[in-house]
Amino acid sequence: MNVDMTRSLSALDAQLAEADVDGYLIRASGTDASQRYLAEFTAPDPFTTLYTAEGDLQLLVSSLEYARARREAAGEVSRPSEYDAGSLRQQYGSREGRARALKAWLADNGVASVSVPASFPVGLADELRDLAVSVAPDSGATLEKVRAIKTETEIDSIRAAQAANEHAMAVAAELFETCTIDSDGGLLLDDAALTSERVQQRIEIALLERGHALDETIVACGAQAADPHERGHGQLTAGAPIIVDIFPRSKSTGYYADMTRTFVVGEPSESITEWHALTQRALGAALETIEAGVTGAAVHAAACEIYEEAGLPTLRADSDTETGFIHSTGHGIGLDIHEHPRLAPGSGELEAGMVVTVEPGLYDPAVGGVRIEDLVVVREDGVENLTEYPQTLTL
């Protein structure tokens, strides 16, 4: 069976031709983004997918997954038992027997040499080489780059995830809007401390109700917000910035969304008000720069220039700074939360169909942190912003 050609695998075809191999081989569970992308199938245990130089897709799955794979997967499906896996394991032991069955399956598909991703199991690669199957690592991360160019169907899946994300952000904002402030400046909800953990739990519930899930989210307040990847803990406080960064995944399609907003309950400091306005400008400058053919480095530079012109430090201007704009401007998103491309120094050209986050921010433990993040599609003549949620600072 041929792979769904609404996705272009021409770059993968070219990689196979350049490497002079018969196919591309993945051994991973369905949680691996490239495995899910190519096979269009998920399973909790590792299975094997082969894309041949002729454009055929073959899967080798356990008997446990065989019936479901035949219904759902994109390619032809076989079981190890069809290649005497049981007797080979008894004769040669578990590892070599598995490799011999895999070699027989590859030979049945006319394959004696394969290219593999960097994540391919080293032990299995060595076992196949011992059996005269040529295994060459794909140092160019070809399939990750293929995945970066989204079809309109994929973009719709990301758009749906972003809609669920915005609902969850609204749930968080409502908690901030309805809370009260105690005599020490702490936030209260229903006469109990409103903590990062309580907000995170409400976000998670809101997402589950809409068929999305996440392992963790960021609700970081005050000095905690000055660490871009601090998840947040403890009671939230009035007047301090609260960074809420939500990155859910659809339980049905597997595609992620990502969005960040910064809120203040009560009166923000003059510095936070200024930082928020500058970050809105940095976000706008980056968005205005994005279009097919522009480099990710140029997008990052556009955001940096706003901060640097205001006299604030960036890693571009000072590689040793620990405050200011201390991360890249964004990253690709899809079946992985972080994937190709990057909006960062040295990053290459953007292509139409890429979906990227744009998330400038400023950080200083003495002040707090501010980050605003939108999720956008690169188009030939600009950008399509999938994010509709407002950027309001004060609640």
Image: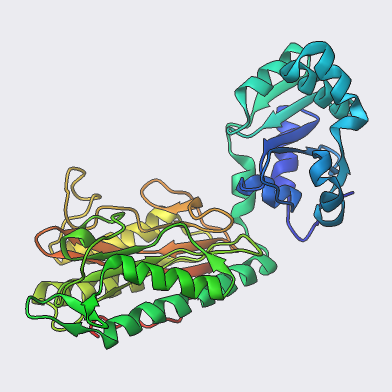
Above/below status of 266 relative to 353: below
- At which x and y percent is residue 386? 51, 75
Which residue occupies 38% across, 57% down? 298
Which residue occupies 50% across, 72% down? 207
**Image quarter for residue 304?**
bottom left
User: Is 277 situated left or right of 53 in this image?
Assistant: left
Foreground residue, 56 or 202? 202
Above/below status of 53 relative to 348: above
- At which x and y percent is residue 145? 59, 47
Q: Is residue 56 visible?
A: yes
Above/below status of 10 relative to 22: below
Viewport quadrant of the C terminus: bottom left
User: Is 354 situated left or right of 9 in this image?
Assistant: left
Foreground residue, 199 or 32? 199
Residue sitting farthest toward the front: 191
- At which x and y percent is residue 316? 25, 50
User: Is 5 situated left or right of 29 in this image?
Assistant: right
Which residue occupies 64% across, 44% down? 143
